[in-house]
Amino acid sequence: MDACRLLVEGRVQRVGYRDWAVKTAKELNITGWIRNLQDGRVEILAAGDAGAVEAFTEACHEGPRAAQVSRVDVQAEPSPRMLKGFTKRFTA
């Protein structure tokens, strides 16, 4: 299982980006957590097979709200875990 942490920057809160990301993750058989950060970014912990995680990362750059995404910062996450403050869990 591969895992990563994505920090999505831009005007992505309150425009449906979070719901779109969860729907896309489920379609790709990705499991994880998602939350809005106070600074306007969306943070996603995503886990699944390597190909699915890569496809999800690419989708986060190119989704229906892509015009509002200014940057997606991706970091490897050795073991996805629930962290304090995450508001929405999604499962494959």
Image (cartoon, grey):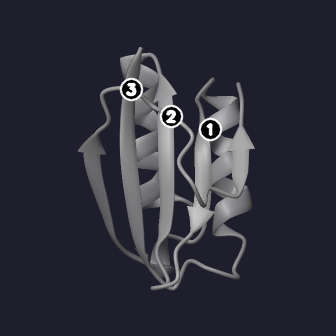
Q: CA distance from mark 2 to mark 1?
A: 16 Å
- Crowd rating for badge 1 (residues with CA inside 10 Å; few <14, some 14–19, many 20+): many
**Vertical order, 46 against 17 (above or below):** above
Q: Mark on residue 79?
A: 3
Residue 92 x/y as whole percent:
70, 24
Q: Are marks 3 and 2 in contact (CB under 8 Å)?
A: yes
**Horizontal relation, residue 13 to residue 53: left or right:** right
The quadrant of the rendering that contains the N terminus is top left
**Residue 46's x, y, as percent?**
49, 37
Q: Secondary structure at mark 1?
A: helix
Q: Amino acid at mark 2?
A: Arg
Query: In which quarter of the view is residue 18 placed?
Result: bottom right
Circle 2 residues within 10 Å: few <14, some 14–19, many ≥20: few
Q: Secondary structure at mark 2?
A: loop
Q: Nearer the viewer, mark 3 or mark 1?
A: 3
- Nearest the viewer among 52 and 37 is 37
- Label 3, label 2: how many angstroms apart (C-alpha)? 6 Å
Q: Which residue is mark 2?
A: 81
Q: Which mark is residue 25?
A: 1
- SS class, disc 3: loop
Q: Which of the 4 image quarters holds residue 17? A: bottom right
> What amino acid does circle 1 point to?
Ala
